C-alpha cells in the first residue's frame, strides 16, 4: 500500500467520521436530556435531504444557501414532534420506556412510508451545485470539496452546540438533565426545555442532512444506514456527551476506512462493532460518559 | 312477422351464429403468474400490461407486425381461436406461486403457464407444471439452475445469468480484436448478497478462461454509507475494465467516490441491475458518461428489428411507459408460446410441448436483439445473446453485437 493510498483512506475516514459525529450529536443531546432514544432520527435526516432536493429542484437554490432554511424547518419539526407526540408519551403512567420506544419507532416507519408515497421509491440526487463533483488535488491525495464543506460545517455546528451550553438556556438544559423534578420548583418550564432540546437535536441532524445532500443520493431509506452508525456512535462516545459524539464519530469513520482497506470492505461494520464491544466491555458508560 | 318478432328472431339467429363460431374456435386459456401485490407489484403490473399487449397482437385484427404471430386475427392453426389470459397473483411468494399455478391448471383449465419474475417462484411453478404435464414458459426467471433440473415441460425464452456474463466477455474479446487494444486486467466489484456474489463467481471463471488477470476482487457491503475506501482500492489496482455488480444506490455512490479521488476507470462494464435504472442516470449525471452495461433488450435497434417501435407504441398506449428489459422479454415469451400452439394446431399440452421443442424463430421475427429462439434439450433458448450498451449523453445506446449497434463503442483501454 502506497503512502498516498494510506493518506487517502485516512482522509476519507475523517471526512465521513465528522458527518457521523454530527448525526450522532442530535441523538445524544435528546437522549442525555430526557433518556429518550429517538428511533426516527435517521428519518429526520432523510426529510432534511428531501427538503434540500425539493427546494433545489424548484428554485435551483444551492444547498449551502439552504442551510439556515432547512435547519430552521427541522428545528420546528423537532419541537412539533415533542409537543405532539413525545410529551404525551412521557405522561403515561406505566411502562413509559416501552411507549417512548414504540412512539419514535412508529414515527420512523410512518415517515419512511410517507416519503415513499410522496416522492416514490426512486433515488434522487442534487447535482450541479457549486461544489459538486469537485476535488482538490494535493500531490496525489484528493480532497473532495463537498465533503470538506460538510466537515467544516459539522465542526461549526459542534462549536455552536457548545456555545449554547454556556448560555442561560444551556444551564437550564443542564439543570433539567440533572434533576427534572427540582427544576420545576425553580420555575423552569420543563416542557419548554424539552421541546427546545428536540428542536436542537432535529436541527443538528438537519444540518448534517443538508451537507450530505450535496454529495449523496436521496431516497426513503437513506436515513437507516446512518442511524445505525449514529446509535453506535452515541453509545461509544457516552450517552449525552457532545465531545464523546465528536470523538466517537471520527473514530468510527477511521475504523471503518481502515478495516475496509486492510481487511475486506464487506467486513467494515464488523471492525466498528468489534471496537464498540471492546470499549463497552471495559468502560460500559462509553468514552466520555458521565453516568 | 311484426317488428318485435323480427328482433327476437334475429337475436336468436345471432346467438346461434355466435355459439357456432365459439364452437369452431374455443379460446385457448393461458395462465400468467406474477406478483401483482406486495413488494414485486411494480414489476408484476408492468408484466400484466405487457402480456395484455401481446395477447392483443395475437387476437386482434390489425396490419401485420413483423414478429411471430404478428399477423393478428387469433390462432389460424386453430380456426382463429383467441388467446385468453388468466392472471394469478404470486405475491412474490414461492408457495403462493405454486398454489396459484395448480389452481390455474385444475380450475381454469390453463393449457400452459407463463411467468414469473423471480427465480424462486419460477422454481416452484415449474415443479407444478411438470407434475400436471403442462408447458411452463419462463420469460424472465434468470437463475442458471432452473433449466438444469431435467424438467421436460420447462422452456425459457430469455437468457440466464451465465449467458449474460458470457456476453460481456464475448464483447471484451470482440472489441479487443477490433481495436487491437485488448483488455488484459479486470477489477471485480460486487455487493455481498446473492446477486453480486453469483455474478462475481461467473466473472472470475470467465476472466480466467479469457486469460485476463483479476487485479482487484472487492466484495463490499450493500448500502454502505461510504464507498471511499473501496474506490481507493480500485484506483490503486487501476484495471483495464471495472466490472461492477451493484444495485442503484451503490452504483451512484461508487461513481461519485471514484470521481472524488480523481479516478476515472478506463472502462466500466456493468452487470445491468442498478446501472440500467433511470434513477441511476439522474443520480450519477455526467459521471455515468461512457459507462457500459449488458442488457437483453435494445430499444434502439429498430433498423434490424423494425417491429420494436410498433410494439413499443402499443405498449406505451396501454401502460404509458416504454418497453424495457423485462416487458420486452415477457411480450416475446407469449408470442413464442402462441406460435407453438398455432403450429401444434391443438390446445393439448403434449402437442404444444412438441411444438415448443421444434420452435425455430429467427431473430428478425422478434422484438429482441437475439439471434432467434430455439430451445436445447434442457428447454433453454440458446440464441438469446445479450447486448452491450454504453451511455452517450445520458442515454444507453447499443454498441454490441456490432451488426446491431446504434453507436460505435468508445473504448479507451490501451490508449
Image (spheres, grey):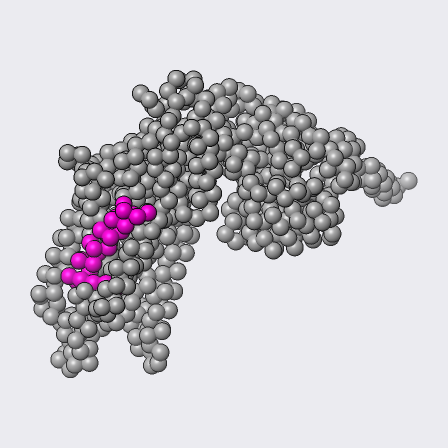
Magenta stretch holds residue A238: yes
Determine the main secondary structure of the stretch shown in magenta.
helix
Magenta stretch holds residue B24: no
Name the quarter where the N terminus of chain A is drawn.
top left
Which span is picked out in magenta?
A: A235-264
B414 displayed left or right of A5: right
Q: Residue at x 67, y 43 (%)?
A: B151
Asked if A186 appears above or below B125 in the picture, the reply is below
Asked if B354 appears above or below B34 in the picture, the reply is above
Name the quarter where the C terminus of chain A is drawn.
bottom left
- Given residues A44 and A257, the one toward you in this image is A257
- Given residues B258 and A152, the one toward you in this image is B258
* Residue B379, percent from left and from top: 65, 37
Q: Residue at x 73, y 33 (%)?
A: B355
B181 displayed left or right of A145: right
Q: Residue at x 29, y 72 (%)?
A: A87
* Residue B262, percent from left and from top: 24, 34
* Residue B297, percent from left and from top: 52, 31
Asked if A86 appears above or below B22 in the picture, the reply is below
* Residue B41, percent from left and from top: 53, 49
Q: Using the rendered image of the protein, determine whether residue B148 is visible from the camera's viewpoint.
A: yes
B102 displayed left or right of A3: right
Which quadrant of the structure image shows residue A205? bottom left
Amino acid at each position: 500500500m502506497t503512502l498516498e493510498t494510506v493518506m487517502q483512506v485516512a482522509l476519507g475516514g475523517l471526512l465521513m467520521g465528522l458527518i457521523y459525529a454530527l448525526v450522532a450529536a442530535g441523538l445524544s443531546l435528546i437522549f442525555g436530556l430526557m433518556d429518550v432514544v429517538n428511533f426516527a432520527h435517521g428519518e429526520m435526516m432523510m426529510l432534511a435531504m428531501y427538503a434540500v432536493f425539493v427546494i433545489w429542484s424548484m428554485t435551483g437554490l444551492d444547498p449551502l444557501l439552504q442551510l439556515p432554511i432547512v435547519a430552521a424547518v427541522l428545528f420546528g419539526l423537532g419541537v412539533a414532534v415533542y409537543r405532539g407526540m413525545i410529551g404525551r408519551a412521557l405522561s403515561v403512567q406505566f411502562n413509559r420506556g416501552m411507549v417512548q420506544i414504540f412512539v419514535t419507532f412508529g414515527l420512523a416507519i410512518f415517515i419512511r412510508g410517507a416519503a415513499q408515497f410522496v416522492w416514490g421509491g426512486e433515488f434522487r440526487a442534487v447535482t450541479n451545485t457549486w461544489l459538486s463533483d469537485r476535488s482538490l488535488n494535493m500531490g496525489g491525495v484528493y480532497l473532495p470539496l463537498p465533503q470538506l464543506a460538510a466537515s467544516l460545517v459539522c465542526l461549526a455546528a459542534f462549536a455552536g452546540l457548545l456555545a449554547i451550553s454556556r448560555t442561560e438556556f444551556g444551564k437550564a438544559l443542564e439543570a433539567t438533565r440533572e434533576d427534572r423534578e427540582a427544576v420545576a420548583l425553580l420555575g423552569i418550564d420543563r416542557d419548554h426545555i424539552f421541546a427546545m432540546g428536540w428542536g436542537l437535536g432535529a436541527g443538528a441532524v438537519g444540518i448534517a442532512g443538508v451537507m450530505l445532500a450535496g454529495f449523496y443520493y436521496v431516497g426513503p431509506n437513506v436515513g437507516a444506514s446512518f442511524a445505525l452508525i449514529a446509535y453506535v456512535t452515541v453509545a461509544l462516545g457516552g450517552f449525552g456527551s457532545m465531545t464523546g459524539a465528536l470523538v466517537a464519530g471520527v473514530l468510527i469513520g477511521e475504523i471503518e476506512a481502515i478495516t475496509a482497506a486492510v481487511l475486506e470492505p464487506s467486513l467494515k461494520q464488523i471492525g466498528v462493532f468489534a471496537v464498540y464491544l471492546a470499549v463497552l466491555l471495559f468502560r460500559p458508560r462509553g468514552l466520555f460518559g458521565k453516568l | 312477422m311484426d317488428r318485435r318478432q323480427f328482433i327476437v328472431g334475429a337475436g336468436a339467429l345471432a346467438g346461434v351464429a355466435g355459439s357456432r363460431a365459439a364452437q369452431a374456435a374455443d379460446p385457448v386459456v393461458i395462465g400468467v403468474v406474477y406478483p401483482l401485490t406486495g413488494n414485486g407489484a411494480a414489476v408484476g403490473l408492468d408484466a400484466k400490461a405487457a402480456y395484455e399487449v401481446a395477447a392483443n397482437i395475437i387476437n386482434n385484427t390489425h396490419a401485420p407486425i413483423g414478429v411471430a404471430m404478428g399477423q393478428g386475427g387469433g390462432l389460424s392453426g386453430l380456426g382463429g381461436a383467441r388467446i385468453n389470459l388468466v392472471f394469478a397473483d404470486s405475491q412474490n411468494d414461492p408457495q403462493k406461486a405454486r398454489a396459484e399455478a395448480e389452481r390455474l391448471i385444475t380450475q381454469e383449465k390453463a393449457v400452459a403457464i407463463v411467468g414469473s419474475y423471480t427465480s424462486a417462484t419460477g422454481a416452484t411453478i415449474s415443479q407444478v407444471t411438470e407434475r400436471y404435464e403442462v408447458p411452463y414458459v419462463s420469460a424472465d426467471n434468470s437463475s442458471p439452475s432452473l433449466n438444469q433440473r431435467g424438467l421436460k415441460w420447462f422452456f425459457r425464452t430469455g437468457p440466464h445469468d451465465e449467458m449474460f456474463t458470457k456476453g460481456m466477455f464475448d464483447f471484451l474479446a470482440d472489441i479487443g480484436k477490433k481495436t487491437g487494444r485488448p483488455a488484459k486486467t479486470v477489477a471485480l466489484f460486487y455487493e455481498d448478497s446473492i446477486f453480486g456474489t453469483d455474478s462475481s463467481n461467473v466473472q472470475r471463471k470467465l476472466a480466467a478462461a479469457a486469460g485476463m488477470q483479476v487485479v482487484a476482487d472487492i466484495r463490499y457491503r450493500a448500502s454502505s454509507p461510504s464507498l471511499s475506501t473501496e474506490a481507493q482500492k480500485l484506483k490503486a489496482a487501476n484495471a483495464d475494465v471495472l466490472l461492477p455488480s451493484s444495485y442503484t444506490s451503490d452504483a451512484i455512490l461508487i461513481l461519485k467516490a471514484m470521481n472524488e479521488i480523481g479516478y476515472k476507470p478506463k472502462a466500466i462494464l456493468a452487470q445491468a441491475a442498478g446501472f440500467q435504472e433511470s434513477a441511476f442516470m439522474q443520480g450519477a449525471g455526467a459521471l455515468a458518461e461512457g459507462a457500459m452495461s449488458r442488457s437483453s433488450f435494445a430499444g434502439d435497434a429498430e433498423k434490424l428489428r423494425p417491429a420494436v417501435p410498433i410494439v413499443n407504441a402499443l405498449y406505451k398506449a396501454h401502460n404509458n411507459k416504454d418497453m424495457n428489459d423485462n416487458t420486452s422479454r415477457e411480450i416475446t415469451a407469449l408470442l413464442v408460446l402462441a406460435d407453438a400452439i398455432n403450429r401444434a394446431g391443438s390446445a393439448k399440452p403434449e402437442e404444444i410441448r412438441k411444438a415448443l421443442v421444434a420452435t425455430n424463430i429467427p431473430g428478425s421475427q422478434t422484438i429482441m436483439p437475439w439471434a432467434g429462439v430455439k430451445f436445447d434439450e434442457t428447454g433453454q433458448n440458446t440464441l438469446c445473446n445479450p447486448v452491450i450498451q454504453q451511455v452517450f449523453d445520458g442515454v444507453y445506446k447499443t454498441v454490441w453485437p456490432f451488426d446491431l449497434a446504434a453507436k460505435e463503442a468508445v473504448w479507451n483501454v490501451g490508449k
